[in-house]
């Protein structure tokens, strides 16, 4: 039996709790590609100072190179994820990884801002549906009791990838130049893709999925009309609040990750390599926080499902307080320590919000549901964060811009609070629809 009262989805892989070794292999390889995804995305931030000098770019231009990736992800994630549900998730994952790796290689050969912007757009196109399709594949082969933990761990892969992208990218750029940094990320993506193609197959993954689950929720795709998909995605007020709260609260990590190397370079006089390495520690704090907070949410909501909403609110408020204080402190070790503590909680609501979305949508459209979550994450948080911070920084300075960023989690906390009020009733109505669909 499940250890807490999560909705019965008919989507329990492996009886009751035993998880096979191959499921963890699939999880590890899928997270590995996610690492490559974010390494390709975040290596840019490590070389911001170099590009600024080489091409005489403003903060607005630099921010646009970062934001265009999230913008493409936001625009394309839903249609590409729906196609992946139909065409097959594993084949879609391979195609996406190939695209972002080749586009990252294109960044290495860019000769001006406009070429780089185009290449970065293709990086975003390749990454567009990976997060939603990858997590849907993972959730299809694990028990529902692990959803918040797995969602947080999977999404934290993006943070760890950002750590590696910024740290390794900064070191490579310091020794071999910024072009070599992009090239290294591209080669790594191609190598990981080859390993994924050899070890993960649709046939083997299908064996991990229960025969009585909703039809075609795994590697082979799902056939549903568009109207039914939309109805399932936006059927309740609480799921909409989960989308909105998740998206807005991610504005903080997106802005700080993008601009921390530049912040350290300008206000702490660090070199490009040292700033990138130090900034990677703040990203690491976010990654660890995502996993810890996701697991904590599962544990604290073991017997009370709606408690995940209160936990998400608490994480958002804690992040606001710490970062609002931190960015107003004088430069020094104490300031960096408080900012680091704030970054630990800045994406803490990722796991709870992902679990909420999974609980409030049918398993047959989980890829589309996580695509919608990804859409909200990108259009409300990840896409505008870097460029808006850059625009404001051109007017009041980078420090002033970063001092405004922590107010975003307060808005997210309000969305989560509203969602909590209708969650219990919404969950009951969704379970009724699932039972009807099962018959």
Image (tube, helix red, strand yellow):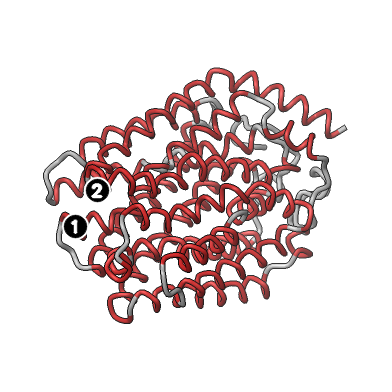
Q: Earlier in the sequence, mark 2 or mark 1?
A: 1
At 41% across and 70% down in the image, what residue appears?
A: 112
Residue position for label 2: 398
**Circle 1 sits in a helix, a strand or a loop, which is it?**
helix
At 67% across and 30% down in the image, what residue appears?
A: 234
Q: Is residue 322 above or below residue 82?
A: above
Structural crowding at the residue carrying mark 1, measured as other residues with C-alpha within 10 Å and reported as few (<14), some (14–19) or many (≥20): some
Question: Is there a contact, CB below 8 Å, between mark 2 and mark 1?
Answer: yes
At which x and y percent is residue 182?
43, 73
Q: Is residue 84 left or right of residue 112?
A: right
Residue position for label 1: 266
Viewport quadrant of the C terminus: top right
Residue sitting nearer the eye, 86 or 198: 86
Residue sitting nearer the eye, 59 or 339: 59
At 62% across and 30% down in the image, what residue appears?
A: 5
Viewport quadrant of the N terminus: top right
Q: Quadrant of residue 310?
A: top left
Give how far apart the Cα atoms at labels 2 and 1 are: 9 Å
Q: Name the residue furthest bottom.
A: 176
């Amino acid at each position: 039996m499940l250890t807490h009262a999560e909705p019965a989805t008919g989507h329990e892989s492996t009886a009751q709790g035993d998880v096979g070794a191959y499921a963890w292999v699939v999880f590890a390889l899928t997270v590995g590609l996610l690492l490559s995804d974010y390494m390709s995305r975040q290596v840019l931030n490590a070389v911001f100072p170099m590009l600024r000098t080489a091409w005489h770019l403003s903060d607005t231009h630099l921010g646009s190179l970062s934001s265009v990736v999230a913008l493409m992800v936001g625009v394309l994630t839903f249609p590409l994820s729906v196609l992946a549900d139909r065409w097959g998730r594993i084949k879609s994952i391979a195609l996406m990884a190939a695209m972002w790796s080749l586009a990252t290689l294109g960044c290495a050969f860019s000769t001006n801002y406009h070429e780089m912007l185009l290449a970065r757009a293709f990086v975003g196109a390749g990454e567009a549906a990976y997060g939603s399709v990858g997590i849907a594949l993972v959730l299809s082969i694990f028990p529902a009791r692990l959803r918040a933990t797995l969602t947080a761990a999977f999404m934290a892969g993006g943070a760890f990838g950002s750590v590696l992208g910024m740290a390794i990218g900064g070191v490579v750029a310091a020794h071999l130049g910024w072009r070599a940094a992009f090239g290294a990320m591209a080669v790594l993506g191609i190598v990981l893709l080859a390993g994924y193609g050899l070890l993960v197959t649709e046939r083997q993954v299908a064996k991990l999925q229960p025969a009585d689950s909703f039809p075609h929720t795994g590697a082979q795709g799902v056939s549903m009309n568009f109207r039914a998909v939309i109805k399932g995605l936006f059927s309740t007020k609480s799921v909409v609040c989960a989308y909105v709260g998740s998206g807005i609260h991610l504005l903080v990590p997106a802005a700080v990750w993008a601009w921390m190397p530049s912040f350290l370079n300008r206000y702490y006089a660090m070199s490009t390599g040292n700033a990138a390495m130090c900034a990677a520690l703040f990203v690491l704090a976010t990654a660890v926080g995502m996993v810890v907070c996701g697991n904590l949410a599962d544990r604290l909501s073991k017997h009370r499902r709606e408690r995940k909403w209160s936990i998400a609110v608490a994480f958002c408020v804690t992040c606001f307080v710490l970062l609002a204080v931190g960015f107003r402190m004088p430069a020094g070790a104490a300031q960096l320590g408080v900012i680091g503590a704030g970054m630990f909680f800045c994406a803490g609501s990722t796991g709870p919000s992902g679990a909420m979305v999974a609980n409030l949508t049918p398993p047959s459209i989980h890829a589309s549901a996580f695509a919608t979550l990804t859409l909200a994450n990108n259009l409300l948080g990840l896409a505008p964060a870097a460029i808006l911070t850059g625009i404001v920084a051109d007017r009041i300075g980078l420090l002033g811009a970063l001092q405004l960023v922590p107010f975003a989690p307060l808005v997210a906390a309000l969305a989560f609070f509203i969602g909590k009020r209708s969650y219990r009733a919404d969950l009951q109505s969704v379970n009724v629809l699932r039972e009807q669909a099962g018959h």
